[in-house]
């Protein structure tokens, strides 16, 4: 009888130890989850959020890699990232989808945890360097609207998170969804404010429409159209709100400076991010180069004072030209020609940023 009691007590102690251990483990998991939430909700920008989600989620679930899919049907998410100065195309763990049609509808409605199927899950993992074995795909939704998904994977079998972490999968998705929605809403408001403040510089749509109109009018002539793309950079402030205020001040000052250097007939507009664009008719290449250098000098001589500091500006320029009337066999529409001209100027701007040659040398204000 006494031996039975001792045996029962031993069994109970063992069970109690296991229960205590599970409680302690659950407490640690919850602490880590709370730390993850705190990190997400104290970030200042969409690029910061993306970087944090990819890194922190991978660590929280103890998996090999993570990716983030964002729905970019109207191009706005890419625009917001560009506005933030984020070179998102270099981040292979960030996938922007032009259409939700590329996704299996089941994977947009509920969480998937299981083995990797390239046909179904390949769109979520486009790195190409590693082949997932097991995956977790967490849809990110707010108010029944699909925003994207957070995706994690293991390179080998039997490496999925324990039950306690898996119980928090939905909560992680919910937290990331709220954080993503907040940053997207802020980006919308910031862009609207920027556009309002820069109303005098027109906007991207106005530029594209005017280019098409000029092509329509000049289709029987031999005049030339040139597009000039300008990008301005400056040191970022640590405070996100201050940085947004500084950006508006800089862009307004640059817009006024550029307009003073252009002709009345030239069309000038705010484009996106920290970029401006202008198109000019019948400008010889030598004059276009001289104008570019004049703009560099004028902007470099600007004195931007903010928060008791002198803010140095760095600018880069790219140009492209199109000769009307010489391309008699042209099969592209005027909309396509206009888009191509802008794209060529933008590509030359990017080259100018990377180049160290004297013709594309950046000028920094002191």
Image (cartoon, helix red, strand yellow):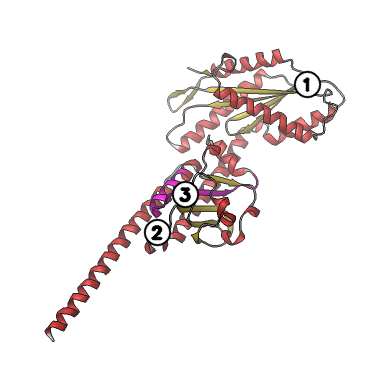
Residue drawn at point x = 41 percent, y = 48 percent: 56
Q: In this view, does 306 lie to the left or right of 257?
A: left
Q: In which quarter of the image is residue 347?
A: top right
Membership of 67 in magenta stretch = yes
Front one among 264 and 111 = 111
Residue drawn at point x = 34 percent, y = 58 percent: 29
Between tags 1 and 3, which lies in front?
A: 3
Of pointers 2 and 1, the one earlier in the residue sequence:
2
In 3D space, how far apart are the residues under numbered discs 2 and 1 (Cα atoms)?
A: 62 Å
Q: Name the residue under label 2.
A: 161
Is residue 210 at least partly visible in the picture? no
Residue drawn at point x = 64 percent, y = 47 percent: 98
In 3D space, how far apart are the residues under numbered discs 1 and 3 (Cα atoms)?
A: 49 Å
Is residue 36 at least partly visible in the picture? yes
* Residue 304 coordinates in the image, percent (x, y): 50, 23
* Residue 217 coordinates in the image, percent (x, y): 84, 28
- Is residue 71 shown above or below 143? above
**SS at badge 3:** strand
Q: Mark 3 points at which residue?
A: 66
Of pointers 1 and 3, the one earlier in the residue sequence:
3
Membership of 149 in magenta stretch = no
Quadrant placement of the N terminus: bottom left
- Is residue 339 shown above or below 170? above
- Is residue 103 shown above or below 199? below
* Residue 232 coordinates in the image, percent (x, y): 56, 26
Q: Mark 1 points at which residue?
A: 224
**How many C-alpha atoms fall within 10 Å of the one at disc 2: few (<14), some, or many (≥20)?**
some
**SS at badge 2:** loop
Residues in magenta? Answer: 51-74
Front one among 43 and 74 = 74
Front one among 46 and 199 = 46
**How many C-alpha atoms fall within 10 Å of the one at disc 3: few (<14), some, or many (≥20)?**
many
């Amino acid at each position: 009888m006494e031996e039975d009691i001792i045996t029962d007590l031993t069994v109970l102690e063992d069970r109690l130890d296991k229960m205590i251990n599970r409680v302690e483990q659950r407490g640690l998991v919850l602490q880590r989850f709370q730390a993850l939430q705190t990190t997400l909700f104290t970030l200042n920008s969409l690029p910061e959020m993306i970087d944090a989600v990819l890194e922190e989620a991978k660590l929280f679930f103890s998996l090999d890699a993570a990716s983030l899919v964002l729905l970019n049907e109207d191009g706005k998410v890419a625009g917001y990232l560009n506005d933030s100065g984020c070179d998102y195309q270099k981040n292979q763990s960030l996938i922007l989808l032009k259409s939700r049609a590329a996704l299996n509808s089941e994977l947009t409605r509920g969480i998937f945890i299981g083995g990797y199927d390239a046909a179904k899950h390949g769109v979520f993992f486009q790195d190409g360097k590693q082949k997932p074995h097991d995956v977790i795909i967490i849809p990110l939704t707010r108010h029944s609207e699909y925003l994207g998904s957070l995706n994690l994977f293991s390179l080998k079998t039997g490496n999925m998170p324990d039950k306690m972490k898996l119980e928090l999968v939905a909560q992680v998705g919910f937290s990331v969804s709220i954080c993503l929605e907040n940053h997207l809403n802020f980006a919308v408001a910031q862009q609207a404010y920027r556009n309002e403040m820069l109303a005098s510089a027109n906007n991207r749509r106005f530029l594209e429409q005017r280019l098409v109109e000029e092509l329509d009018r000049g289709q029987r002539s031999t005049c030339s159209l040139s597009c000039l793309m300008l990008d301005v950079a400056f040191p970022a402030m640590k405070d996100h709100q201050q940085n947004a205020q500084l950006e508006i001040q800089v862009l307004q000052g640059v817009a006024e400076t550029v307009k003073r250097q252009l002709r009345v007939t030239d069309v000038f507009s705010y484009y996106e991010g920290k970029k401006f664009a202008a198109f000019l008719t019948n400008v010889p290449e030598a004059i276009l180069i001289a104008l570019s250098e004049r703009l560099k000098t004028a902007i470099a001589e600007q004195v931007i004072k903010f928060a008791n500091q002198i803010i140095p500006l760095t600018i880069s320029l790219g140009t492209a030209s199109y000769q009307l009337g010489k391309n008699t066999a042209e099969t592209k529409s005027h909309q396509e020609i206009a888009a191509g001209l802008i794209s060529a100027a933008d590509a030359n701007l990017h080259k100018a940023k990377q180049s160290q040659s004297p013709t594309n040398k950046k000028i920094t204000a002191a």
